[in-house]
Image: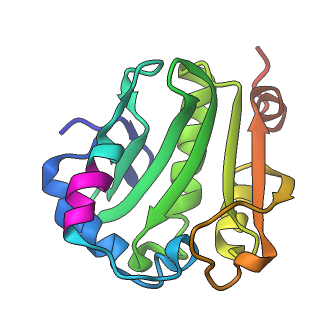
Amino acid sequence: MPAFLETERIALRPFTDADAERLFALDDDPEVMRFINGGRPASRGTVQARTLPRLRHVHPCFGTPGYWAAEERVTGTFLGWFEFRPLDERDPAVVELGYRLNRSAWGKGYATEGSRALISKGFTDLGVQRITANTMAVNARSRRVMEKAGLVFLRNFTGEWPDAIEGSQHGEVEYELTRAAWKRISGRAR
């Protein structure tokens, strides 16, 4: 399957039905899901019926999905996924950046590498004007990835979640990067 985007080490491609078992394994890892749902086990049925269709949904303003399966370019090993999804399906101006990687991929720079590549593609090819990313305030690793990718802290907020998980009492954080700021920090003047 052709890649949507490639970096030195990562290929991002659309999801297929064949990814269901890999997604289940990712979402069934309690450490991967710690800051998402408190580490509760996944369900194969939910992954097949809800998760995979959401990840494959094509957004009209891009003509592409907003989620990408991430694989090592050399080995084809499934690393997880990246999100680069418009907040309004009809307008590419504001997108949400996200990532969920297998534990075996943590600490190797994949999240930063993939995020930077998506940011560059968004600002140069997709008409994006602002990128936003959110995580729990206590999720230091994810916050560090956002910072290394060039996003800056915007605000703390408290979301409404059906089930409180450890750390949720500290709230959420939002980071952002605008096209103008990206051009300044990347040295791209246009």
- Residue 178 sits in which quadrant? top right
Magenta run includes residue 50: yes
Magenta run includes residue 155: no
Q: Main secondary structure of the magenta part?
A: helix
User: Where does the image place residue 103, in percent across and percent down from the top left?
Assistant: 43, 79
Q: Does residue 76 appear in the picture of this structure?
A: no
User: Is 48 located above or below residue 58 in the figure?
Assistant: below
User: Where does the image place residue 39, in percent across and percent down from the top left?
Assistant: 47, 83
Left or right of 18, for residue 61: right
**Magenta stretch in the rendered image:** 45-52
Residue farthest along the front direction in this orientation: 162
Between residue 7 and residue 92, name the one nearer to us.
92
Residue at (26%, 46%) from the top-left corner? Answer: 15
Left or right of 135, for residue 11: left
How many tags in the picture? 0
- Quadrant showing the C terminus: top right
User: Is 123 located above or below residue 169 in the figure?
Assistant: above
- Quadrant showing the N terminus: top left
Residue at (70%, 76%) from the top-left corner? Answer: 168
User: Where does the image place residue 77, in percent across and percent down from the top left?
Assistant: 26, 65
Left or right of 77, for residue 145: right
Residue at (34%, 46%) from the top-left corner? Answer: 55
Left or right of 127, for residue 102: left
User: Where does the image place residue 31, in percent across and percent down from the top left?
Assistant: 48, 84
Q: Does residue 28 appear in the picture of this structure?
A: yes
- The scheme the figure's colours follow is rainbow
